[in-house]
Amino acid sequence: MEKMRAIMDTETEMIPNCEFSSLEEVKNFERENDVTLPEDYAQFLFEYGGRFTAEDFYYKPIHRTPRSTEMGYGFVNYFYGTDIVQNDDSSFDMFKEDFDSNLLPIAEVGGGDLICIGVQGEYFGKVYCWIHDIWITEHTIDSVFLVANSFSEFIDSFEYCESV
């Protein structure tokens, strides 16, 4: 996962108190929150925790989303660490209820939209972009768009782009 080091903003400090101190702590998080994380994402949480992305790095989703740039890219502002469940913006409880615990919010993309990872069933391991304002009357899986078939594929899709 060499590419992760390139896309993570190492100039800006990590989000305070948002890192996992060990892989065992990540496993404890899974047990406490009744989720199973894909191995590549669990490793990412341990190595990087909550951190902003480097400037001018964008991901290329396998399917365009309503928020994709004209050139088809998407942006991630920061990845959650331990604040997945503590951050009001992540709406962890809402996702557990409204998406039947299929998705876990893992990153903020700005404007209230989130990157999520599948944590069970047919969604497991896949990465989605949740568009918050598509919901009309109730939360449905129709408001999420597949951006990668795995977390590793998602990270590999990032490119340095000065203008998108």
Image: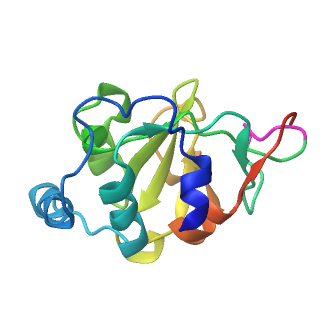
* Magenta-span inclusion, residue 147: no
Against 62, residue 64 (above or below) is above
Direction front: furthest residue: 11
Q: Residue at coordinates 34% horizontally, 47% vertically from top-left?
A: 49
* Left or right placement of residue 83 versus residue 149 in this view: left
Against 124, residue 157 (above or below) is above
* Range of magenta residues: 66-70
* Left or right placement of residue 25 versus residue 93 in this view: left
Q: Is residue 86 visible?
A: yes
* Left or right placement of residue 26 versus residue 142 in this view: left
Q: Residue at coordinates 73% horizontally, 36% vertically from top-left?
A: 56
Percent position of residue 79, x then y: 45, 42
Q: Residue at coordinates 47% horizontally, 42% vertically from top-left?
A: 107
Q: Is residue 148 visible?
A: no
| Dominant secondary-structure state across the stretch colored magenta | loop
* Left or right placement of residue 35 versus residue 73 in this view: left
Along the line of sight, the residue nearer the viewer: 159 or 91: 159
Res 58 → quadrant: top right
Number of marks drawn: 0
Along the line of sight, the residue nearer the viewer: 115 or 102: 115
Q: Residue at coordinates 23% horizontally, 63% vertically from top-left?
A: 35
* Quadrant of the snapshot with the C terminus: top right
Percent position of residue 43, x then y: 35, 66
